[in-house]
Amino acid sequence: MTSSLKRQLSGETRDSDEKRLQVAVDVGENEYSSVAVLVSLIPGKEGKYIVKGKPTTKIGRSRACDIALAEPDISTLHCELCVLTVTIDGYQRRLVNIVDRSRNGTFVNGNRLVKRDYILRNGDRVVLGRSCSFLFKYLADNEEEHPISASSVPTQGENNSDQFKKPTLSSQDVVRRPLSAQRPTFLDRFIVGKELGSGHYAIVKEATDKDSGDIVAVKIFHPQRNDDQKKTKQFREETKILMSIQHRNIVKLIDRFVEPVSKAQIQTYLVLEKVSDGELFDRIVRKTKLRQEETNAIFTQILNGLRYLHAKNIIHRDIKPENILLSIRKRQHTEEQQRGPWDDDEIDITIKIADFGLAKFIGEMQFTNTLCGTPSYVAPEVLKKTGYTSKVDLWSAGVLLYVCLCGFPPFSEQLSPPSMKEQILQGKVAFYSPYWDNVDDSCLHLISNLLVVNPAFRYDVQQTMNHPWFSDNSYLARSPALMSRQAIDESRIPKTYSELSSLQ
Ligand code: PIT
C-alpha cells in the first residue's frame, strides 16, 4: 500500500518547523510487525495479546474478531485498536488509538470512553466490560514480542509472514533525528510533581527526569483540539521564541513534546530549566519593598535579558514581578564573599525572565488590537490599540521598578479618580512622600523617563542601561533628595503587595 493512503489528521502546514507534527493512519508496509501488547490481568488467565501494526485490530466476542474474548459481558465487537503512525520532530512512533464499540463500556484507567477515542499510553489499564482487564504496553523499537505459548489466553490469529519491506525514507522525511527512533513520550521520561503556577492556557509543574534525576519545570498546555488554530499558533510562537534564545537571564527551554491524546486532541509540553527560588513577586511580598541597591542589581539583570531579546526583535509583552524568577546561591560559610548587594544569607542571585506566552517576534507583528499583558503593567499604546514596539517592555519595566522600590503600583484603581486606565493613558505618576523620600533622585529620574506616554520619547533598553542610576551609585552614600515628592492622603495609597496578599 502506498503513502498516498495516509490520512493527515493535523493541519500543520505553514513552514517546515510546523510540519513536524503529522499523524497518519498507518497502512505502510510494516503493518504486521508488533506494536504493543495487552497483558491479561484476568484472574486465572495469564498471558498477553499482541497488537500488530495492521490498521485496525478488532476485539470482541465474535470469532471474526482479531482478539476473540469469550466473556459474557463482552460485546460482539467490543472495541477497536487503530494503529496510527505519528511523526513528531523527526521521531516516528506507532501509537494505538482505542475506540469503544460496546454496550457495557470500555474503560481506560477507570474512565469510560464515551463516544470518544483515546491514544493509549504505556501502563494504561484497559478494562472491557466488567471483568476483562489488561495492562497496555508499547513494545520498544524493533522489539518483537512473542506470545507465551503456554498461555491460557489465545494469541491473536495473524498471518505473521514478514512479506513486507521496511519503509524507505522519502526526501520529506529527512529530519534531524533518525526516523527509526521511537521517541519516549513525556510521561515515559518524567515524573510530574507539584504545581509551580498556572495560567489560562497551561499549568507549570515541577518534574523529575527518570534517568538523570534532574528536576525541571514543565509547562503543560491544556489539551487542545488539533484544529484549534489560535492555541496552536500561540504554542508555536512561544516555542519558536524559546528555541531561538539562550541567555543566562532567560529561562532555558530544554525540550518539547507534542503528543496526541486522541485523534482530535493533542497535548503539548515545554520542558524548562527549573529556577528554584520563587518569583520576584514573592520577594517583594515578603519584604514589603526592596532596598535600592538590591533593586538596582536585579534590574541590571532584567535589562540584560531585555537587551538580548530586543536585539533579536522579540518583545516579551508581559514583564511583571510574577514573571521574574530567582535563583539564589545561599551562604554556606560565614567567610564566603558576597557577589552583590544581597541579604546576609545570600551569596548571589541570578534572575531569569520567564513566561513567553505573550511574546512576539517584532518582524511578524501586525499592528494588533489584542490587549495583552497585565492591566497595571500595560503600556498606554497597548490600551490605545494603536500598535506597539519593544518600548512596551520598557514601560512595564518602569512599573516594575516603581513597585520594587515602594511595594505598590504606580497605577491602580485605588488612586482613582481618574480610573487606572486614564492614569496610564495620561502617564500620571507620583512619587508619594514618605514612601519615596529615601530613594535617590537619579532613580526617580529614570522611572520618569520610562513611564513616558509617547513611546518615541520613552527610553529604550540601551538608554536605560546607560542611565547614571546604574553607574553612579550615589544612593549608597545617601544624598539629600532633591526632586519633589508629592504629599498624599494616606488612605489613597494603594495597598502594598504584602498587605494585598495577607488579605487573600
Ligand atoms: C521555573 C519555575 C517556575 C516557573 C517556570 C519555570 C516557568 C517558566 C516559563 C514559562 C513560560 C515560558 C517560559 C518559561 O514561555 O515557577 O523553573 O510560559
Image (spheres, helix red, strand yellow):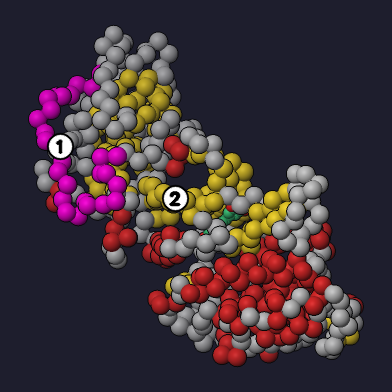
Image position of 336 with respect to 310: above or below: above
Left or right: 323 with respect to 150? Answer: right
Q: In this view of the protein, which residue sits in the foreground, 462 or 221?
A: 462
Please, what is the three-letter code of the amino acid marked with disc 2? Answer: Asp
Is tag 2's residue or tag 1's residue first in the polypeptide sequence? 1
Q: Look at label 1 and name its amino acid.
A: Lys
**Can you give x and y, in whole percent of width and height, for residue 355 in the image?**
55, 62
Residue sitting nearer the eye, 344 or 334: 334
State the residue position of label 2.
255
Instruction: Tell which residue pokes out farthest to the top in this image.
Output: 150
Instruction: Name the side, left or right, on which 292 lies relative to 179.
Output: right
Quarter holding the C terminus? Answer: bottom right
Image: magenta residue range = 155-181
Name the residue beneath numbered marker 1.
Answer: 166
Q: Is residue 473 magenta?
A: no
Answer few, some or many: residues within 10 Å of disc 2's Cα (few below 14, many 20 plus, some between 14 and 19): some
* Disc 1: CA contacts within 10 A as few (<14), some (14-19) or many (>=20): few
Q: Main secondary structure of the magenta part?
A: loop
Asked if one can make out residue 231 in the rendered structure from this viewpoint, the answer is: no
Q: Residue at x 25, y 48 (%)?
A: 24
Q: Is residue 493 shown left or right of residue 200?
A: right
Res. 226 visible in picture: yes
Decide: marks 2, 1 in contact (CB < 8 A)?
no
* The quarter of the displayed image where residue 289 is located: bottom right
State which mark lies toward you, 2 or 1.
2
Numbered disc 1: secondary structure? loop
**Which residue lies at the image location 31% right of the left edge and 33% below the top edge?**
79
Q: Please state the horizontal and vertical placement of residue 62, each as a whole percent of the image.
A: 24, 24
